[in-house]
Image: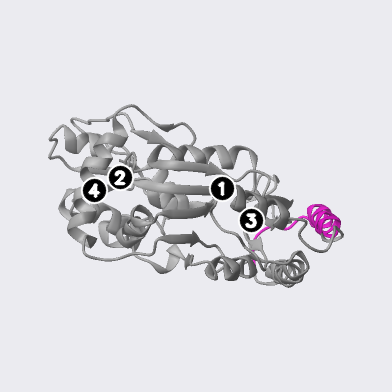
Amino acid sequence: MGPVANHFGHFMAEMVHRIMFYKNLGMDLKYVMVMSEGPNGISNYNKLPGFTKEILNFLEIDESRIVILDRNTLVETLHVCEAGSDLSGGVKGGYLKLLREYSTKKLEKLHGSTTRPAKIYVSRSGLPPEGSILGEDYFERHLADEGFTIFRPEEMRFTPQMDYYQKSEVAIFTDGSACHGTELLGDGMLNQVVLIPRRGGLPAKTFEKVLKPRSRIFHMAADCMEFIGTPFVLANGRPAIHRGASLIDIDEIVHFFRSNEIAALPNISVGEYRAAAELDFKKFLAARQRSRRAWSDSLHEEMLTAFERRKSGDGEPTI
């Protein structure tokens, strides 16, 4: 299978995509997972994260078939299928068909009689401030006024997440780990999907490769958010982009949503949004007091400058 990963997004993106081929070949074998040495290593099934056990259960792999290696090990025979997808390359031929055939039946069995909302916005507003969309809760309230359910996947078990996504008529995502909750859905199992890039560049392309092949209609809402920076740095000194903050461009997102008949947002206000974003920005900066992550004063100054520049624009939507 691959390494044990105590991170939902990476486990879904990188560790599950050989399993369907093993199942399709009828290989009723044990699955090897690898953990590095160390006193805090995950060395047995009971120590696996809860979401990992749920994913394995969905794929009908029980505890007796999991072997976790925590030291260098020789094996007599090892089968390694090509992964059906990878983190930045996207899905490979035939894989989505296998997923559709399996996951459609499995979700019908688990949740077939359950009604889900027609329109969902997959929110980050319940997560810690690092990696946030400033003023997101204000934006959400206006979507809720138009019938969108504000969906927080971190509050939901794994298979209900998948069921929400596949039963929605419209699902709005921003780039992030929540998108990986769709990785075991097949082609056409998502209906209309909107992806709003909050960091631009490579992350947006990566998540487009996850969502677009599984969607009947796919929209990339480019230029609707602006990444204003991050004060946090990685161990190698590079900016921790995933711990940064983004601002919504209200004019752009209203224009995009109206043009694609997703939402009208008639009462949204740039001025009110900016006030909400400023409050969230203060919370974001206060996260330094609680975080053990490395902080860069120069990146912090750049972020403050970017926020002030964006805050000084016009007052109300022009649309």
Q: Residue 15 at what x, y percent from top left?
A: 36, 43
> Mark 3: which secondary structure?
helix
Q: Which residue position holds label 4?
A: 104
Figure quadrant of the C terminus: bottom right
On the picture, is 160 further left or further right than 78? right
Foreground tag (1 vs 4): 1
From which residue to which does the magenta span run? 291-310
Mark sitting earlier along the chain (1/4): 4
Q: Which residue position holds label 2?
A: 33
Query: Would you place residue 212 above or below residue 124 in this image?
Result: above
Q: Residue 9 at what x, y percent from top left?
A: 45, 50
Q: Amino acid at mark 2?
A: Met
Mark sitting earlier along the chain (3/4): 4
- The structure residue drawn at horizontal position 27% and vertical position 30%, both measured from the top left corner, is 80
Q: Which residue position holds label 3?
A: 243
Q: Residues within 10 Å of mark 2 (few under 14, many from 20)?
A: some
Q: Amino acid at mark 3?
A: Arg
Q: Is residue 241 magenta?
A: no
**Of 161 and 148, which appears nearest the observer?**
148
